Amino acid sequence: MFDNFTPMMLALFGTSLWETVIMVGVSGAIGGLLGIPLGVFLRLTDHKGILGNRPANVVVGGLVNAVRSTPFIILLVAIIPFTRLVTGTSIGTWAAIVPMTLAAAPFIARLVETALREVDAGLIEAAQSMGASTWQIVWKVLLPEALPGIVAGLTIALVSLTGYSAMAGAVGGGGLGDLGIRYGYQRFLPDVMLAVVLILIVFVQGLQSLGDWLVRRLSHR
């Protein structure tokens, strides 16, 4: 069973794991930078938000829902021209980061919006009564109070991105998914496929455990 795990194959596992880390880490970071402000905007402009603006909320919310409802494998193929424009290629690790980021941002936005909804309305009213500006309410009330929920949401997003990275491997995106498809499936090496699955399980478990630990450290309830 272990005859297939030659030094060259083990090196491929190491390279593929690193590519998966890059894809998940970079797309998660950029997705968070885009998704968190987007989630704040959706919360501020909803019907109970301090900047209630239904038309803007409906338009932006509709775009977010449109991207979220598009299966990732379809999104991956549909934006190939945009991916080529950004990275100069449609295959490889960095090319996969583009659709992964576009998939992550609206997903994170909705998770952030949900976390912000959990903030006690009384705290917001108290801040408003003391003359706090919208900017101050966001930075000193909403985000600090919702931080554990936001971190929990980001953890969920990173776990989902791990699955997206495996799907990206099916179209030459690199990473563990690509390794599993090329060697485990196309070359009929089930032990390689099993090893890829086990590594992904450990990887996801590590992400979830780290996220849970951060949430416990940040939670003050």
Image (cartoon, rainbow, N blue to C red):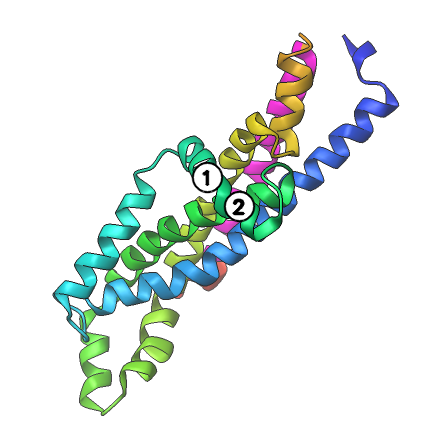
Residue 126 in view = yes
Q: Is residue 204 magenta?
A: yes
Can I make out residue 148 in this image? no
Residue nearer the viewer, 211 or 94: 94
Residue 44, percent across and down?
23, 69
Q: Determine which residue is flagged by label 1.
A: 160
Of labels 1 and 2, earlier in sequence is 2
Magenta residues, as a range? 190-215
- Residue 179 sits above or below residue 92 on the image: above
Q: Quadrant of the N terminus?
A: top right
Q: Position of residue 194 (x, y in %)?
A: 63, 17
Q: CA distance from mark 1 to mark 2?
A: 20 Å
Q: Which corner quadrant of the image does residue 174 belong to?
A: top right
User: In terms of image quadrants, where is residue 92?
Assistant: top right
Numbered tag placed on residue 83 in the rendering:
2
Kindly state the secondary structure of the residue where label 2 is placed: helix
Residue found at x 21% / y 58%: 59
Expressed as whole percent of the image width and height from the top left, the position of residue 26 reads 58, 52
Residue 172 belongs to magenta span = no
Between label 1 and label 2, give the one nearer the viewer.
2
Q: Residue furthest right?
A: 7
SS for dot 1 = helix
